[in-house]
Amino acid sequence: MIFARKENRLREICVDHFSSVREALLAFSELLDSYLVQAKPSPGLLSRLHAAEGRADERRDEILTLLHGGAFMPTNREDYVVLVALVDGIANQAQSTGNLLVLTLPPVPDFLRQGLRDLCRGAVNIFDVLTSVFSCLNADISRVADRAREVSRLESESDRLEWDLIREITDSDCDRALKRDLREIVQDIGKLADLTEDAASRLKLMLIKQSF
Amino acid sequence: MGWSHLKIIGGLYLGWGIGANDSANIFGTAVATRIIPYRLATILIAVFVVLGAVLQGPAQYLSLDFSGEAGDTTSTEALLATLATALTVTVITWLAIPASTSQAAVGGLMGIAVSSAGLGGVHWDRFGAMVVCWALNPVLSAVVCYFFLFLLGKIVNRWIRTAIGRDRFCLLGLLGFGCYGAYALGANNVVVTTAAYFHSGTFGPPTLTSARWAALAGSLSIAVGALTYSRKVMTTVGCRVTPLNPFSALCVVLTSGVALNIFTLLHIPISSSQAVVGSLIGVSVYDRGGFGNLGELLKIFSGWLLTPFVACLAALFLAWGAHHLHIVLLS
């Protein structure tokens, strides 16, 4: 109780969880790159994506077990439960989008390729900033607000790019079914940034509750 | 042990009631929000109440006597004083008005003093000083709590810069300050449980040594009350209190401990409940710039004013009844 063993252990597992989610995002980004180049999905990268998402789920379960075992005061446990669920949702979204890509195999027009890459790499970049927000929570809590603002700024940029891509798809000559599939892919990738911002908002809330 | 020694049961019952009710003022919020387990809380209360009572409580016994001469209270009068207190607290609580056991006990002692020494033989100056301190208690607590919220807030925000650190600070603070609050409760309130019996000679001649025995007996009854019957009040009061975050809760507990300690040094028993309500006003002013529910506050204050006078009248009535019915309780 005094030396915060459970809490420090939970922090370590949260860092592992963040790493696993990042691994899932990277695997998805590489899967998308490889699909855009070769017009077919790489089975190895898909397996890597699923494995990373599975590891994230395991870390999530460990975190919940530790919280149930008494880590942190009850008033603060809910914040960690929600945060872990939000972060885990990012890995789930990456896996879900990867599955959609592999199952629908949409022919991606040239005008869309770079935009999709930028959107996906942007999601990885935003997640890296989220990871630094979480680090600040346990290093220098006063910096959480600034870093969370950076996440919001990057998410706004991602939203603008997503909107531009959807407009290009809508204005293109592709048939309606393909437009629908492509819009879905773009929106699903854009959702990665949205979920990351939700997690950053939760960290900001934790900062507010811990400021006296 | 004669029948006169057995009359101490009245004081022990009073102490049990203090333990059962006032435990909520120390660990109520922490137990209700499951920050601290109930059993751990009651054990800590029991240990530190006895420590506080035995170490700092005895000094108050010699001064808590309103009649003309020290030692001229009989054990029967002591029993009547505690009965009057118990009756008053029961009735006022039944009317859903907050009651202070310690103030009721002082009112009971006053009634017995008036009954035995007459109006002219009573130390009204001592009683007057107590009434002033009772009025000062919530005001002082509000100011001190506001100060603690400000100062501790600055210290925590500046020096504890991790979420884990702040979580531990609040948990250990609630535990540590709760122990201090229990110590202060024992030191301040034990006197009202067995003071009348001390002055009646139940523990021997009125010296510091016999005061320590009286304090031990009273504190053990408070400890038993906390261990056996505090759960319901702890969880009820803890949940009904204005929603507090762990930080403001620990400031409230610290403030009530400090208030109890200050008035112990002045040899004046005060109500821990009043100290807590005063602290909550301090929290309300600090967080929201207002005093909270004024209607509820007026109800609380009226209960506090009413309690000692009702207890005094009840003790007078019981003493008059015992005298006129010639009830001799083998004194």
Image: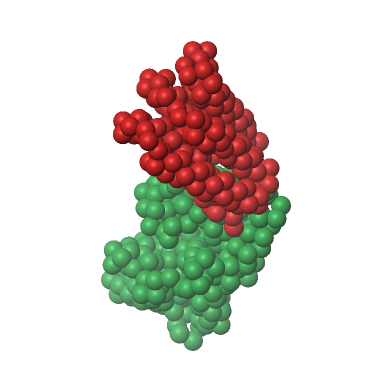
Chain colours: A red, B green
Q: Quadrant of residue B306?
A: bottom left
* Res A113 seen here: yes
Q: Is residue A187 left or right of residue B261?
A: left
Q: Residue furthest front?
A: A173
Q: Quadrant of residue B314?
A: bottom left
Q: Is residue B123 above or below residue A75?
A: below
Q: Between B19 and A144, which is closer to the camera in this rendering?
A: A144
Q: Quadrant of residue B208?
A: bottom right
What residue is drawn where x is 43% and y is 66%? B100
Q: Is residue B38 above or below residue B61?
A: above
What residue is drawn where x is 44% and y is 35%? A186
Q: Is residue B269 left or right of residue B328?
A: right
Q: Between B181 and A100, which is closer to the camera in this rendering?
A: A100
Measured as percent of width and height from the top left, residue B102 is found at 47, 65
Figure label count:
0
Measured as percent of width and height from the top left, residue B308 is found at 42, 73
Q: Is residue B51 left or right of residue B98?
A: right
Picture quarter with the C terminus of chain B: bottom left
What residue is drawn where x is 58% and y is 71%? B143
Q: Is residue B63 above or below residue A182?
A: below
Q: Between B91 and B86, which is closer to the camera in this rendering?
A: B91
Q: Residue furthest bottom?
A: B120
* Res B257 seen here: no
Q: Between A107 and B307, which is closer to the camera in this rendering?
A: A107
What residue is drawn where x is 50% and y is 15%? A42
Measured as percent of width and height from the top left, residue A8 is found at 63, 33
Q: Residue furthest right?
A: B159
Measured as percent of width and height from the top left, residue A182 is found at 40, 32
